[in-house]
Amino acid sequence: MFLYINDDLSARVISRSAVTNTGRGGRQSAGTLPLMADDFSTEVTREGDATVIHVRGEIDLATCERLRDAIEPHLGPRQTIVLELSGVGFMDSSCLNVLLHARGTLTADGGSLVLRNPSDAARRLLTAGQAEHLLQVEADERPPDRQG
């Protein structure tokens, strides 16, 4: 099952079989959801002993493997990986598995996974998926949302 969080805060749960990109002949099939555009990038930097992966764009079924590919080379004993998520415009539940797998691997070896400055889209997914407590969130660099 996948949980899609829209910008208007509405959510839809769909089955994996309902997610297809095209039907026969390359046309969109009726009743299927289109995959998101390929608007995704990562940049890896170092801050002290931590590996920082700056993530930008949309993380969905089509791009979550690219996120995994950016994280995996840095998994190791006592490693800290910081995912800078302020540039994430969309995130669906396919990303949760990648994050939870990375966190499990890192913490088993004495390391940690830190989510830094999660965008509103990332926060909504973590909250809706009841996974915000599973990952450490550094919010001290994110200015508070202002009502106004």
Image (cartoon, helix red, strand yellow):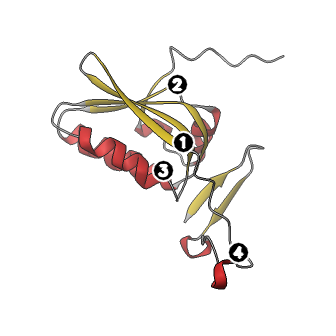
User: Which quadrant holds residue 7?
Assistant: top right
Tell me the kind of residue under disc 2: Asn
The residue drawn where x is 74% and y is 79% is 30
Query: Badge 2 local density, few (<14 within 10 Å), some, or many (20+)?
Result: many
Up-down relation of residue 4 to residue 140 (above or below): below
Label 4 – label 2 distance at C-alpha: 36 Å
Label annotation for residue 96: none
Q: Which residue is mark 2?
A: 117
Check the picture and name the quadrant holding the N terminus.
bottom right
Label annotation for residue 95: 3
Going from the N terminus, do you reach mark 4 or mark 2 first? Answer: 4
Going from the N terminus, do you reach mark 1 or mark 3 first? Answer: 3
Where residue 130 appears, x then y in whole percent? Answer: 53, 45
The residue drawn where x is 48% and y is 43% is 131
Tell me the kind of residue under disc 3: Cys
Find numbered disc 1 in the image and state the secondary structure of the residue it sits on. Answer: helix
Tell me the kind of residue under disc 1: Leu
The answer to whether the residues at label 1 and label 2 have Cβ atoms under 8 Å apart is: no
Where residue 114 appears, x then y in whole percent? Answer: 38, 29
Q: Which residue is mark 1?
A: 126
Q: Which residue is mark 4?
A: 28
